[in-house]
């Protein structure tokens, strides 16, 4: 199949569909919800959307430096690979729930995994 | 670049010229952030692009399209933009927006006390005023004091605009409305603003309306609007107050529920007193106890900001899509205008 991962997965509408499911799973998980708890849910959703746009291979302005800066505060509050793994699990469950094909899911999870060192500031 | 990514991307340092002085905008700042950091006394309230009280006009330099989101065409054409949303890509020359563009004169038709703490004010605008039930307006007194109020009226049902004003102990505007305001006096209105209103097209969608205090105002407008549109799905309205006298439209809403099978009114009292027909507890707690699963619901929230924020999250976790949850952020803070010579 031709086209970028982002195009094949369905572009921005796919991201929008995923954000609602993904952010709800993350907020409902007591092992990680405190990292995402905020009084400004719209701002938090926009951050989740930017993150999903990136792991869906979409056009974005995020790079490793931004990911590091965005998560530095969380790392100092104890964010570690267990939490990273939990978030990745919710991402995978979201993609399954949306019926995303296995090969595309694997690509997305590959991009997500590649961000671990930047997210955890290692 | 996606719009969100563009929004999050830093911009280089820019300069603003305002009232003859130059100010620097840091890459991470909005125009409003920069003006406030330099100590300027500019009006603002929600800082989320909703209330429009931080509107400014650019006389030179282009403003990003997203900083004009939600503004009327005439305002856009004049270069008006919301300073709280504006991360400038250009250097900008700024002026305060012209009043005649933003404000409409309105005459007070009636002021009624609905309870010891709530007044209902009916206003007649001097020119046609298009709005949706559930939106809000900014009301300006002749000395420049501004406050935002939700509209309880419905365009197709009501001749007047209706607002509900809660008396606050140190509230300059609310005290004035209670003690001084008389029919025949004039005020200025800007708006309408806000995206929390009834959208026809899904007549069977369940609607959940939760408000406390005068947060009831927009919810009543939305309920009337939906019923007039022929909405067939269930409409559940939860109104919470501490004391029974705060249920200031108890009779109207009870009657409305008698006339419409699909409209249910749930008065809730969080204080110690009990009243026949009223639920003991907070409106949002009662609402979520009754509605554990909110998939497919449209939820409208209005009132005390911590309640609204908590209920927004609870509604989302209960399955409502974030796009289906409407809560216009209000902060109870002084809104001061720059004195003009």
Image (tube, coloured by chain):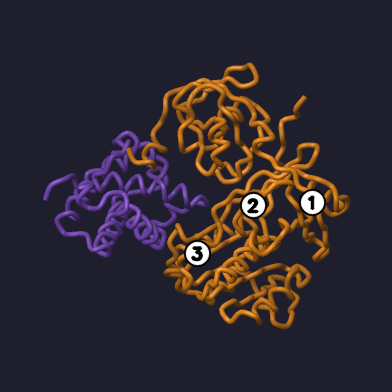
Chain colours: A purple, B orange
Q: Where residue B275 sits: x, y (%)?
A: 74, 80
Q: Chain of mark 1?
A: B
Q: CA distance from mark 1 to mark 3?
A: 34 Å
Residue at 47%, 71% (x, y): give it.
B205
Of the two numbered discs 3 and 2 in the rendering, the one whose residue sits closer to the viewer = 3
Pointer 1 or 3: first along the chain = 1
Callout 2: SS: strand
Q: Is residue A106 above or below residue B287?
A: above
Q: Can residue B45 be seen here?
A: yes
Q: Is residue B313 above or below residue B333?
A: below
Q: Where residue B219 sits: x, y (%)?
A: 62, 64
Give the position of the N terminus of chain B as an image quadrant.
top left
Q: Is residue B19 above or below residue B323?
A: above
Look at mark 3 in the image and give the residue it sits on.
Answer: B200
Callout 3: SS: loop
Q: Are marks 2 and 1 on the same chain?
A: yes
Of the two numbered discs 1 and 3 in the rendering, the one whose residue sits closer to the viewer = 3
Report the front residue among B35 and B289: B35
Q: Are marks 1 and 3 on the same chain?
A: yes
Residue farthest to the front, as pictured: B127
Q: CA distance from mark 3 to mark 2?
A: 19 Å
Left or right: B229 with respect to B114? left
Give the position of the C terminus of chain B as an image quadrant.
top right
Pointer 2 or 1: first along the chain = 2
> Which label number is shown at residue B174?
1
């Amino acid at each position: 199949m031709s086209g970028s991962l982002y195009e094949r997965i369905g572009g921005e509408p796919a991201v929008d569909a995923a954000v609602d499911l993904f952010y709800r799973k993350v907020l409902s998980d007591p092992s990680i919800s405190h990292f995402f708890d905020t009084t400004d849910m719209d701002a938090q959703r926009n951050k989740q959307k930017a993150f999903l746009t990136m792991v869906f291979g979409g056009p974005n302005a995020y790079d490793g430096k931004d990911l590091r800066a965005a998560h530095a505060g969380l790392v100092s509050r104890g964010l570690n690979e267990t939490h990273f793994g939990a978030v990745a699990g919710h991402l995978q469950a979201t993609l399954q729930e949306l019926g995303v094909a296995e090969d595309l899911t694997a690509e997305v999870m590959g991009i997500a995994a590649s961000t671990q060192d930047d997210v955890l500031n290692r | 670049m996606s719009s969100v990514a563009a929004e999050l991307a830093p911009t280089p340092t820019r300069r603003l010229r305002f009232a003859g002085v130059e100010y620097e905008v840091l890459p991470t700042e909005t125009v409003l952030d920069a003006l406030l950091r330099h100590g300027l006394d500019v009006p603002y309230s929600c800082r989320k692009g909703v209330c429009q009280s931080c509107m400014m006009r650019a006389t030179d330099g282009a403003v990003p399209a997203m900083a004009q989101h939600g503004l009327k065409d005439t305002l856009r054409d004049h270069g008006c933009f919301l300073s709280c949303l504006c991360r400038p890509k250009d250097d900008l020359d700024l002026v305060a927006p012209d009043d005649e563009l933003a404000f409409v004169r309105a005459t007070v038709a009636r002021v009624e006390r609905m309870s010891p703490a709530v007044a209902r004010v009916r206003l007649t605008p001097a020119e046609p005023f298009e709005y949706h039930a559930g939106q809000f307006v900014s009301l300006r007194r002749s000395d420049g004091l501004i406050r935002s109020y939700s509209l309880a009226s419905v365009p197709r049902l009501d001749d007047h605009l209706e607002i509900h004003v809660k008396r606050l102990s140190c509230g300059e505007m609310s005290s004035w409305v209670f003690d001084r305001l008389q029919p025949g006096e004039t005020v200025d209105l800007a708006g309408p603003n806000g995206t929390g209103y009834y959208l026809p097209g899904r007549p069977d969608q369940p609607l959940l309306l939760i408000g406390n205090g005068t947060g009831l105002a927009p919810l009543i407008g939305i309920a009337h609007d939906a019923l007039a549109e022929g909405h067939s799905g269930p409409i559940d309205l939860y109104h919470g107050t501490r004391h029974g006298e705060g249920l200031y439209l108890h009779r109207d809403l009870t009657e409305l529920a008698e006339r419409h099978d699909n409209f249910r009114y749930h008065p809730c009292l969080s204080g110690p007193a009990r009243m026949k027909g009223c639920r003991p507890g907070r409106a949002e707690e009662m609402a979520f106890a009754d509605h554990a699963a909110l998939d497919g619901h449209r939820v409208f929230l209005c009132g005390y900001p911590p309640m609204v924020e908590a209920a927004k999250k609870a509604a989302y976790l209960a399955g409502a899509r974030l796009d289906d949850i409407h809560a216009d952020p209000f902060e109870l803070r002084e809104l001061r205008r720059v004195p003009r010579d």
